[in-house]
Image: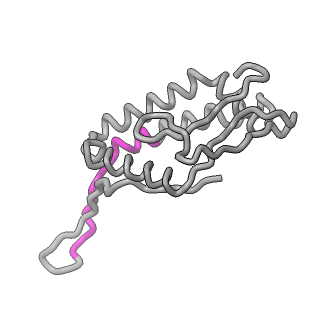
């Protein structure tokens, strides 16, 4: 991000960047300078519903059937992209949080990519474990399979 360049952030829904339906947004301010660095969408119920519908459709139309290898490879590509774009991500996070650049580099950049690589490996280790007989003549086991989209609210 160039100095004094204000970003216009958007939601990503169904693989496309889109504005909120009502067009609402708010300024993002660099706490270390007070400078406006971005305009961020303020999404409403309709935007959430649109995102949920897209996630359900993706799940039902192929994502649920992706192999552990494909899921792992996509996560590995994300980790690579984080490292490949480390300079830009450092600049963005420093401006967004008012954090010293070197602190982000030392404490977060490599760790973020490493966490994603850990889960890429975990995606290949789906296993069902025998769990004994709870009813005589019947063996119980754990089977892991996707059940659908999930939601998370984060700060």
Task: Provide residue 140's location: percent of width, then percent of height.
Answer: 22, 69
Magenta segment, which residues? 119-133
Q: The N terminus appears in which quarter of the rendering?
A: top right
Task: Provide residue 28's location: percent of width, then percent of height.
Answer: 74, 40
* Position above or below: 8 against 1: below
| Left or right relative to 2: residue 74 | left
Residue displayed at 78% across by 21% down: 3
Task: Provide residue 7's location: percent of width, then percent of height.
Answer: 67, 29
Residue displayed at 52% across by 25% down: 81
Residue displayed at 44% across by 48% down: 51
Residue displayed at 42% across by 35% down: 15
**Residue lying furthest bottom:** 136
Can see residue 116? yes
Depth order, front residue of 153/67: 153
**Residue lying furthest right:** 33
Task: Provide residue 48's location: percent of width, then percent of height.
Answer: 49, 53
Depth order, front residue of 10/122: 10
The reply to whether the magenta stretch includes residue 121 is yes
* Position above or below: 123 against 2: below
């Amino acid at each position: 991000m160039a100095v004094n360049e204000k970003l216009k952030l958007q939601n990503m829904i169904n693989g496309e960047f889109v504005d909120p339906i009502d067009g609402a947004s708010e300024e993002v301010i660099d706490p270390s300078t007070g400078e406006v660095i971005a305009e961020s969408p303020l999404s409403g119920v309709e935007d959430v519903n649109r995102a949920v519908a897209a996630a359900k459709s993706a799940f039902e139309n192929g994502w649920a059937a992706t192999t552990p290898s494909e899921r792992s490879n996509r996560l590995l590509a994300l980790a690579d992209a984080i490292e490949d774009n480390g300079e830009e991500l450092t600049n963005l996070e420093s401006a967004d949080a008012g954090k010293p650049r070197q602190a982000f580099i030392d404490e977060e950049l490599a760790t973020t990519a490493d966490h994603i690589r850990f889960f890429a490996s975990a995606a290949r280790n789906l296993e069902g474990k025998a769990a004994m007989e709870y009813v005589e003549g019947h063996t119980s086991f754990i089977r892991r399979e996707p059940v659908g989209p999930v939601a998370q609210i984060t700060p």
